[in-house]
Image (cartoon, grey):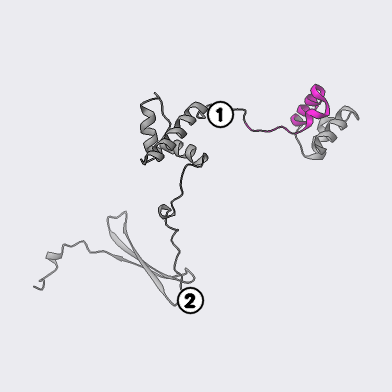
Amino acid sequence: MGLERYVVDAMVLEGRSPREIARLHGVSKSWIYQLVARFRAGGYEALIPRSQRPHGCTHQIGPELQAAIVAPSQELETAGFDAGAASIRHHLQERFPQVPATATIWRILSRHGLVTPQPQKRPRSPFVRFEASLPNEMWQADTTHWHLPDDTDVEILNILDDHSRLLVGSDTSPTDRTPRSLTGPQRQ
């Protein structure tokens, strides 16, 4: 509350202009006017920063429906049936006209500690790229087919050093579109 109180005191008690205060401290004049209005309405206590969190969430699942999601989970599990989010959603469709998505049901079950982690279902770790330990130890070659504006097909060959990712060479050559049977006699 240091800067807020200083700004209000400078304007209200000292009579300094909002433009001067804003320029000296790098704040906007509208913020200064808001602080002074809050001070006049509630004193120094009103200058304490307020939470920006919304007071409510219009699309949040109500407590009644959350209880209806948690109860069948425990009942199904004790009976030995599948107590997953898809099963619970199926059971809820019989009782409620509008049912949340399966992912929402899963999040509610997770929040209540009713989801058992299964490490074997965890996604595989991301691919780790192999890299040669020395320059010029290994090269990578890649070809790309390209169609030029003059109706010519070409093949582009790029060669990269695997260690430094340096482009070692690049070559372009036209591709042959002649069918194999017309190129000459074939071995049998």
Q: Residue at x 76, y 27 (%)?
A: 34
Give the structural element (helix, strand or loop) at label 1: loop
Q: Quadrant of residue 2?
A: top right
Indicate left or right for 175 with 123 as reference: left
Residue at 68% across / 33% down in the picture?
A: 51
Q: Amino acid at mark 1?
A: Cys
Left or right: 33 in relation to 131: right
Percent x, y of residue 180: 15, 65
Q: Residue at x 42, y 33 (%)?
A: 72
Indicate which disc residue 1 carries: none
Q: Secondary structure at mark 2?
A: loop
Question: Bounds of the magenta span?
Answer: 30-53
On the question of residue 62 being in view, the answer is no
Label at residue 57:
1
Dominant SS of magenta comes to helix
* Amino acid marked by disc 2: Pro
Camera-nearest residue between 15 and 106: 106
**Image: 125 above or below 171:** above
Eyeballing the image, is 121 above or below 46?
below
The answer to whether residue 179 shows anywhere in this view is yes
Disc nearer the start of the sequence (1/2): 1
Locate the C terminus and report the quarter of the image it occupies. bottom left
44 in relation to 151, above or below: above
Name the image quarter holding residue 90.
top left
Q: Which residue lies under the disc numbered 2?
A: 135
Furthest residue to the top? Answer: 41
Q: Is residue 188 left or right of residue 105?
A: left
Q: Position of residue 20 (x, y in %)?
A: 84, 34
Q: Give the percent coordinates (x, y) of residue 23.
A: 80, 37
Distance from the alpha carbon under mark 1 to that under mark 2: 57 Å
